[in-house]
Image (cartoon, helix red, strand yellow):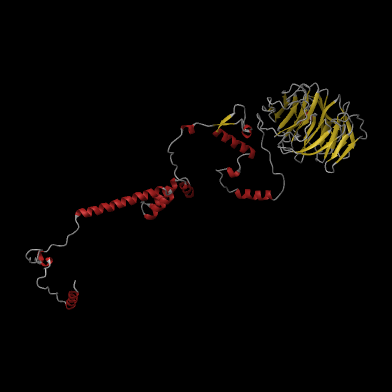
Amino acid sequence: MPPERRRRMKLDRRTGAKPKRKPGMRPDWKAGAGPGGPPQKPAPSSQRKPPARPSAAAAAIAVAAAEEERRLRQRNRLRLEEDKPAVERCLEELVFGDVENDEDALLRQHEDSGDSEVENEAKGNFPPQKKPVWVDEEDEDEEMVDMMNNRFRKDMMKNASESKLSKDNLKKRLKEEFQHAMGGVPAWAETTKRKTSSDDESEEDEDDLLQRTGNFISTSTSLPRGILKMKNCQHANAERPTVARISSVQFHPGAQIVMVAGLDNAVSLFQVDGKTNPKIQSIYLERFPIFKACFSANGEEVLATSTHSKVLYVYDMLAGKLIPVHQVRGLKEKIVRSFEVSPDGSFLLINGIAGYLHLLAMKTKELIGSMKINGRVAASTFSSDSKKVYASSGDGEVYVWDVNSRKCLNRFVDEGSLYGLSIATSRNGQYVACGSNCGVVNIYNQDSCLQETNPKPIKAIMNLVTGVTSLTFNPTTEILAIASEKMKEAVRLVHLPSCTVFSNFPVIKNKNISHVHTMDFSPRSGYFALGNEKGKALMYR
């Protein structure tokens, strides 16, 4: 637009007058003249049409769009609610008013659920389990695990048929082994344990228990019979090998030490760890083949006798001194071989010739008194309280003596025995075991041996066919070890109180035990050791 026309338009707007058109200017078609035609007259106001309104089709499209948008929102909301816990959905319905009778519905849902809201929420936190895309048929086949080629799994076999186990059975077996080692299911592994009102009292008892010292280790209620779980350990005397016969094997009463003595004139001490068993010390006694060696009751001394001497050697472990006892006043024995130490450490009993039993004071090694039986003394032992002495004679009779008065309390014939060879008493004072030359071991009740003149044995063990030369009870009186030195592999372990023999010991196919001359259990029955004529002190755990 030219500048002069623009100025004129502004002036006209200020004065309110319409701008005048120049002659020859093209008329506006909106003022009534059509383009290129004669001018038209404006229509009257009554004939003018109202402004156009939206059509029905457009309204329908808008409604359909709104409905589609609402449906999409509803579908998205449902998808989101699928991942929400039930408690959260219920609270949303209650807050936003989507449920009729909101309080009644919430109470009804809470009553129907057996779990608490916290448990339900915890369950809802787990993601939904998805189905596998594909399944391999080989995975469904039960895979077998070889038990023979693994030394740890081999110990868990109950019989030879379990050379292979499925994974599920192996898992159960491992669980059983763990529970057996722990003495049951530990408290931290119990999933169904609920806290009761007595928990406060138990916590007070635990606090009181931890405020005092003592031995809190308890044994299992009972040892199962049938199969005994054992495994071979390194030989006790592996660091000091010998070819001479082992005459004595004994565990220290208070330390992890085992003593091995034999006909090679040496007494050796080894630390017990089941792996290497390192040697601690060896004491060599010149021209003194050891017939028997034994710890004192307190473990401070080692006593040793020879096969052809009357000298009694005493080794003081604390001072490191070797003290020979050449002569005991009043003792007229030419050879001192077999002896016993009382459990309380007060007395020393020496088996003499011609049926004599000599009682000595352990501290001074002086003679207190002597007792005599008919025939020859085959074996002797103290009772668990050190108040009585049981002696087995060569005539098959058993004598019971009182230690304080040195009087015979009872005398009975060992049933079926012609010649006694060994005798042993249990630590709990319940059993007396007598071994004879025919291979029979009679197990008696101690009370019947004291009161009856012809007691009947609880059980006669007839698993050996040669003379029973060794008898040993374990400290918990759950196992009785019996052995004969006349035949190879002639050793058995008897379960008590069932008086049945464990079927898996010894392993006959190995044949590494040979002739057994001595046996002993560790103070807590964790180890079992035996000595043979080949100079090996075998040890089992």
Q: What x and y, as percent, mark residue 336?
A: 88, 31
Q: Is residue 393 above or below residue 56?
A: above
Coordinates of residue 148 in the picture (x, y in percent): 61, 30
Which quadrant of the figure contains the C terminus? top right
Answer above or below: position of 80 versus 133.
below
Residue 431, by quadrant, is top right
Residue shown at 85% from the left, 37% from the top:
347
Q: Residue furthest front?
A: 2
Q: Nearer the viewer, residue 396 or 470?
A: 470
Quadrant of the snapshot with the N terminus: bottom left
- Residues 317 and 384: in front is 317
The reply to whether residue 190 is in sight is yes
In this rendering, is residue 532 above or below 107? above
Image location (x, y in percent) of residue 171 = 57, 36
Q: Residue 180 in the image: x percent, y percent?
A: 63, 37
**10 or 430, which lies in front?**
10
Q: Is residue 95 left or right of residue 61?
A: right
Judge left or right: residue 26 versus residue 282. Answer: left
Q: Is residue 127 left or right of residue 486?
A: left
Single out the residue that lies furthest toward the left: 38
Residue 387 visible in the displayed image: no
Figure quadrant of residue 539 = top right
Q: How many marks?
A: 0
> What residue is at 45 percent from the left and 35 percent from the top?
135
